[in-house]
Image (cartoon, coloured by chain):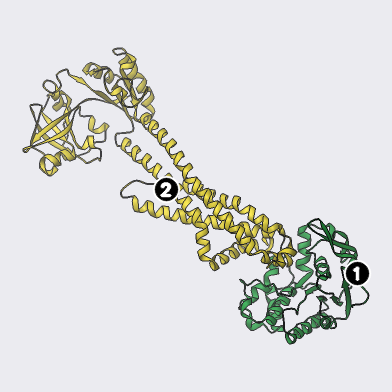
Amino acid sequence: MASLNGYKDIIQAAISDFKRNKVRTLLTSLGITIGVLAVVMLIALGLGIKNYIREQFESLGANLITVLPGSGFSGGGFGAGLVGGAKFDEKDLRELERIPELKYVVPVFFKTSRVEANGKKEFAYIRGVNEDFFKLRNVKVIRGRQFNASENQSKAKMAVLGYTIAEKLFDNPDNAVGKTIRFDKQRFEVIGVIEKSGNNEEDLGVVLPYKSTYGGINPDKTFWGINLGVESEKDVEIAKKKAKEVLLKRYKEDDFSVAEQTEILSTINQIFNILNSVLIAIGSISLLVGGVGIMNIMYASVTERTKEVGIRRAIGATEKDILVQFMAEAVLLSALGGFLGLLIASIIVILVRPFFPLSINLLSVVITLSVSSAIGIFFGVFPARRAAKLPPIEAIRYE
Amino acid sequence: MIKLVDVCKTYYLGDEEVKAVCDVDLEIKDGEFTGILGSSGSGKSTLMYMIGLLEKPTRGKIIIDGQDVSKLSDEELSHLRNRYIGFVFQSFNLINRYTVKENILLPVKYAKTKIDFDPEKRAEELMKRFNIYQRQDFFPNKISGGQQQRVAIARALILKPKLILADEPTGNLDSKTGEEILDLLAELNKDLGVTVVIVTHEKTVADRTKRKIFIKDGKIVKKYL
């Protein structure tokens, strides 16, 4: 069959059989459709969560190195290092600024407070930083302006508000610039509003020149952490090493940690990779069940067409011709199921995308289509072999 | 030419050995019109299917065109069935999912070597000759028994075989239509020189052939009783 008319003929024959049996064809491939749908959706969900987290980190800046108190991310778990340990001060800043690879050194003073303005009182995250903060963290000021270096030096009482806090206090961020806010018994003039980021801590943030916090708000003149920025990613490792050396002169190793964003990201990625594998394994079970469904129908189909097999053998079909015919049907059935599953998954992804960044990549498409075809081959080969091995004479007499 | 030398076919029904055909020596020459006559269970069908290479003898040799077929592989046997032999069955054995024309052309799909004529054209000639041309796009269950048997004969002839094996070709037809089918087979034998072997239990059918072979209890006998 294959030699003269090619596989096109076999596939055409199988497809025309499917057309005559539309309902059964659809029901048979439904198992594979559901299996593929489950696997693709779970991969899409996993990728979506990963992408979402990566985007969040990338919005912080890819060349960002974070100095935090405690052993932090490089050692034990999250959060462990966020309490206790070193308190950084201006002396550390000056030492770190000497490292040539570092383009930005941004101290971060951090506290929470209730901010008053316009007769309202709202919870906010107060951050004291220098002027480089905006560049290092890709923070865009959409109303008014940011503060500059000399305003920091002169301890100017200026504040740049996060979008949500500006909205809460002044109803509309457009109204915020030029107004005064009050917290911790101090007054600050609002000079700008930051673009909405989706991150609560940033949107409810109040960004101040760090020197202006000295005194009432930050009497110790210390910082919770220091953000460092390098020019390009290749400098990250060397800058980290040098920053560590500098800080080791004053602090014990366990009192601080120097981590880059990718390190934190890779920890999170590891967790999600494990989670993903488990989900895919569960999804694969439904693919397997779908394959068994195909095998079942193919066995029924072989029995139903026993006489036909006999006729075909009588007019010259070889065992291999019969095998190929039934294999082609099984593989096409599961490929059809796989394709339908993929199609439905794509539609769901497109529909959900505005709300959550689900994503289908080429790899998952290739894997699911080849896995479903492989399932067709594996579960198709047993019924097809039975058909091929039928004794022609018994087959032709079968009623 | 077909030659059977000391051919035996035994089955096992449980532990019991059943001899369907035994000690058969037979020669059918090219162009013969032969009837194999026997009652039901006499082994005549088994004999025919051995000649038709659908069944292998447990003992003895079958020689077709000087070639001992017992040593041939599945591919080679299938090729011979495809190009050398055409089958006609009692119950027509057409595939109901395919149209008349698709059924007639089905053997072409299994042809492994080049066909030196246009099978489509030959199918049309055969359909015209057998008066089923108007029915070419019909499905077999929508045409009469006589027409179905003519489709089956056209299918058997599509690749210009040397031998037609017909197993009770009139068994499912009324006597008038049966006569027409027998006329057709006789005509093929006479006009095209195709060797025709008809297996039957009806003496009237066997009487139409030029040579009669009687079979009883799996053995060839001189006289039919």
> Which residue lies under the disc numbered 1?
B26
The chain containing the residue under callout 1 comes to B
**Left or right: residue B132 compared with residue B54:** left
Q: Amino acid at mark 2?
A: Met
- For mark 1, give the secondary structure: strand
- Residue B71: x and y in percent read 84, 57
**Mark seen at residue A41:** 2
- Residue B2: x and y in percent read 87, 69
Residue occupying image coordinates x 39% and y 44%: A45
A95, A54: nearer the viewer: A54
A105, A122: nearer the viewer: A122
Q: Colour of chain A?
A: yellow
**Left or right: residue A268 compared with residue B59:** left
Residue A338 in sight from this viewpoint: no
Instruction: Give the quadrant of residue A71.
Output: top left
- Residue B61: x and y in percent read 88, 61
The residue at the far right in this view is B222
User: Label 2 vs label 1: CA separation?
Assistant: 69 Å
Q: Amino acid at mark 1?
A: Leu
* Quarter of the image with the C terminus of chain A in it: bottom right
- Mark 2–mark 1 CB contact (< 8 Å): no
